[in-house]
Image (tube, rainbow, N blue to C red):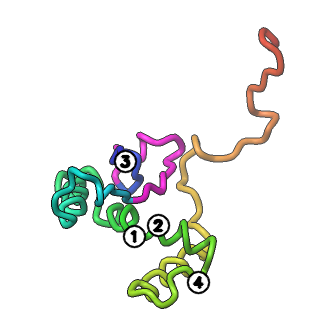
Amino acid sequence: MRAARFVDERDRIRRSNPFGSKLNAIFSSDIGHFDVIDMRHPLPEAYELVEDGHITEGNFRDFTFANAVKLWGTQNPRFFEGTRVAKEAAAVLAAAQTPPSPPPNNPALQRRPLAALPIRFYPGES
C-alpha cells in the first residue's frame, strides 16, 4: 500500500494525487498465511504508517474500518446488522449519505466550458 495515496489536510499528500483524489484503500492481511505466527501482529504493523507520519489517524480509521463499511454497507445496508460494529457502521453509512463538501477554491480544479478546452480530434489538427 502506498501511504501517499491518502488525501488529508497536508498539502504534500494532496499534491501527490491527481485533482486531490482519494483512494479508498482497505486493510487486508493474510492473517492465516504461514509466516504470520501471531494474529495480533499485522494491525500494529499497519499502524506504523501513523507512527511514522505517513498517514493520519483519520486515514488509518478509514483504511481499517470506514472504507470497508462503505464498500459492503452501500451494497447491502443490512450487512452489519447484529454485529459488534453495527452502531458504528450505521454512523459511517449515514455520513456517507450526506452530500460532499464543495470543492476547494482551486482554479486548476474548476470546471471550464468545453469551448475553452484544447480538444484535438485527429493527430496534427489544430
User: As shown in the figure, which amino acid type bears the numbered disc 2?
Assistant: Ala
Q: Secondary structure at mark 4?
A: loop
For marks 2 and 4, the one nearer the N-term is 2
Q: Is residue 14 magenta?
A: yes
Residue at mark 3 to residue at mark 1: CA–CA distance: 24 Å
User: Which secondary structure lies at badge 2?
Assistant: helix
- Does 4 sit above or below residue 123? below
* Marks 3 and 2, how far apart at CA: 26 Å
Q: Is label 1 or label 4 in front?
A: 4
The disc at residue 79 is none
x, y percent for residue 51: 17, 57
For label 2, the residue is 68
Q: Earlier in the sequence, mark 4 or mark 3?
A: 3
Q: Amino acid at mark 4?
A: Arg
Q: Residue at x 28, y 54 (%)?
A: 33
Q: Where does residue 125 sit, x and y in percent of width and height?
A: 82, 12
| Residue at 28%, 65% in the rendered image | 57
Q: Are marks 1 and 2 in contact (CB under 8 Å)?
A: yes
Disc 1 element:
helix
Q: How far is mark 2 from mark 4, CA to CA?
A: 14 Å
Q: Which mark is residue 11?
A: 3
Q: Measuring 69% from the left and 46% from the top, which residue is drawn there?
A: 111
Q: How many marks?
A: 4
Q: Tell whether 104 sits left or right of 123.
A: left
Q: Residue at x 41, y 46 (%)?
A: 5
- The range drawn in magenta is 10-26
User: Which mark is drawn over residue 65?
Assistant: 1
- Is label 3 in contact with label 2 (beta carbons under 8 Å)? no
* Residue position marked by numbered label 4 in the rendering: 78
